[in-house]
Amino acid sequence: MRILRSTLAPTFAKHPLRNCARFPALALALAPFTFCCASLSAQTANPVPAVTEAPPATAMDTLVRARKLVEKYFEQASNVVCTENVIQAVVGKNGKAIYREDSVFDYQMQARTNSGSLKLVESRDTRKAALRDSARSLLITNGFTSMLLIIHRTYEASYTFEPGGDESVDGVTYVRIHFKPVPGASSPAAMQLRGQNYPLALSGTMWIERQSGAVAKLIASMDSDLSDLGLQGMRSEIHYAMVHFHDPDESYWMPVSAVIDVETQRQHWRNIHRFAAYKRFKATIQVEEAESKP
């Protein structure tokens, strides 16, 4: 049994974990959403310019800014590499890990646009392999850093969005936005069992920094009951933070952690991904003309 991505599929490479219960991650499918407003003007014989104050930004205005930043995020993500630490754990009834394995990878996510469609590719080079216990079945999770596709303009109509109030943390104001799947719309994830795909509807909340429009935290959980297939619950929590680069000085909002819990009737897995040591790179191509010889 595994969880698959659907329309927008992150492709995963160089992940050497074997003998594991596979729940590769979410490729998120969203549909276009357009905000527009009409303006009415009145004319008089001697028009007098009216001085009006701009209305305060609403939660949905913040969501619009976040959608623009998400597009930029996928562009910037292709220009950086980082170190990914992965903890794969089996969780006991007390909520604590009764078995765990640790791995370290060199991680990169690339976003490619082919024929107008977005394709995400995750690459992992093993830096430190975990010591495997072949008798254990572990969870493999990939692609959760691309959960921001939930508000990507291409597929965002697969969800409804509602304001959830503000929350202040360390002097920073975050706008909470709740999202729910639209019935019958494309699902961001699917479970594959015996060759069959079963869509998974996801609902949750995102925390968006009011001033910048950057998504700082996103929590999503399974919105449907698939207990007849053995899957009782899935929950993911992803945190993002600003990463600073120099020469030139730039700042990107990038993922720093992802925690994924998956429960079946007999097992509870928890995977923790931590992303650190971000490095930016740029590729240059030099073309040389060959000398012609008589």
Image (cartoon, helix red, strand yellow):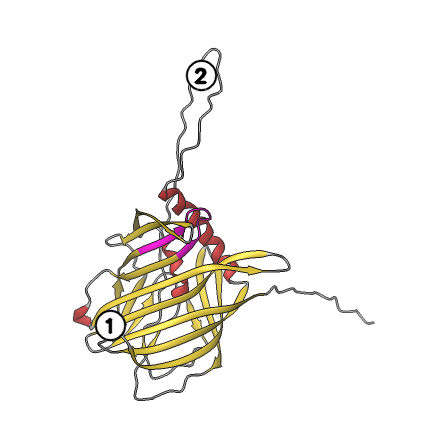
Residue at the far bottom: name it: 134
**Mark 2 falls on what kind of element?**
loop
Residue that label 1 marks: 263
Q: Residue furthest front?
A: 170
Range of residues picked out in magenta: 205-216
**Which residue type does callout 2 highlight?**
Gln
Badge 1 density bin: few <14, some 14–19, many ≥20, Cα 10 Å:
some
Marks 2 and 1, how far apart at CA: 64 Å
Q: Residue furthest left?
A: 228
Q: Which residue is located at x 36 percent, y 55 percent? A: 150
Looking at the image, residue 56 lies above or below residue 204: above
Q: What kind of residue is marked 1?
A: Glu
Residue 97 placement (x, y as % from top left): 30, 78
Relative height, residue 31 to residue 8 (above, below): above
Of marks 2 and 1, the one in the foreground? 1
Query: Which structural element holds mark 1?
Result: strand
Taking the image as shown, residue 38 lies to the left or right of residue 109, namely left
95 vs 145, left or right, is left
Residue 153 shows up from this direction: no
Residue 285 coordinates in the image, percent (x, y) = 66, 65
Residue 89 seen from this side: yes
| Label 2 Cα crowd, 10 Å radius (few <14 / some 14-19 / many 20+) | few
Q: Which mark is residue 16?
A: none
Residue annotated with mark 2: 43
**Sequence-wise first label, 2 or 1:** 2
Look at the image and say whether residue 31 sits in the magenta stretch: no
Residues 162 and 51: in front is 51
Name the residue: 29% across, 70% down: 261
The structure residue drawn at horizontal position 27% and vertical position 71%, both measured from the top left corner, is 262
Residue in view at x 79 percent, y 69 percent = 291
Residue 91 location in percent, x, y? Answer: 27, 77
Q: Residue 94, located in which quarter of the rendered image?
A: bottom left
